[in-house]
Image: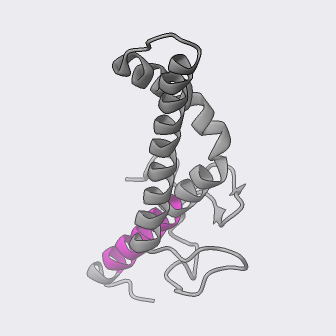
Amino acid sequence: MARLGALSGPVVRTGYSLVGPRSRYSGGMTDSRPENGAVPASTKNLVLALLAYTVARIALVVAIGAVIFYGGRAVGVDVPFVAAAAFGVLVALPLGLLLFKPLRLRVNAQIAAVDARRQAQRDDLHARLSGREN
């Protein structure tokens, strides 16, 4: 039974790695050496990229909330902390997508790389279990 979309889809070039459709016939996917400028596919790199993106987004929410809270006090308006935090989240959501696009693309590329590596390992295991070793 064929997987839906296993051999179709456009190839996308991000700033970090080449991400394309999954294919059982793409040789060298388990090679530990990265392509030119690509980040190696490891769970550690994925966790670090995700941590950097998350910390940046949380810092943006805190900064915007502080600007609203203390900016209101500076002009003589008492803004409740909960209101400043809520507006900080609402403003930071779309702003974070724009400001931290390179971090987001890095996380996406790492997810795709780890997924491709796991898929290649899974395909290799299935091939070895069915007796079709290379």
Residue 39 sits in quarter: bottom right
Residue shown at 52%/66% (left/top)? Answer: 113
| Residue at x 44% of width, y 21% of height | 84
Q: Position of residue 68 (x, y in %)?
A: 53, 23
Is residue 54 or residue 72 the one in the foreground?
A: 72
Image: magenta residue range: 112-127
Q: Main secondary structure of the magenta part?
A: helix
The answer to if 116 sits in the magenta stretch is: yes
What x and y, as percent, mark residue 120? Answer: 44, 73
Q: Residue at (67%, 38%) from the top-left corner?
A: 98
Q: Quadrant of the C terminus?
A: bottom left
Of residues 43 and 88, the one drawn nearer to the viewer in this rendering = 88
- Does residue 3 lie above or below 121 as drawn? above
Q: Does residue 16 sit above or below 42 in this rendering?
A: above
What is the x, y in percent for residue 80? 37, 15
| Above or below, 78 relative to 96 | above
**Furthest-left residue in view?**
129
Relative to 39, residue 78 above or below: above
Residue 17 forms part of the magenta stretch: no
Asked where in the image residue 91 lies, by quadrant, the reply is top right
Q: Residue furthest top?
A: 77
* Residue 26 in the image, given as x and y percentages of width and height: 58, 73
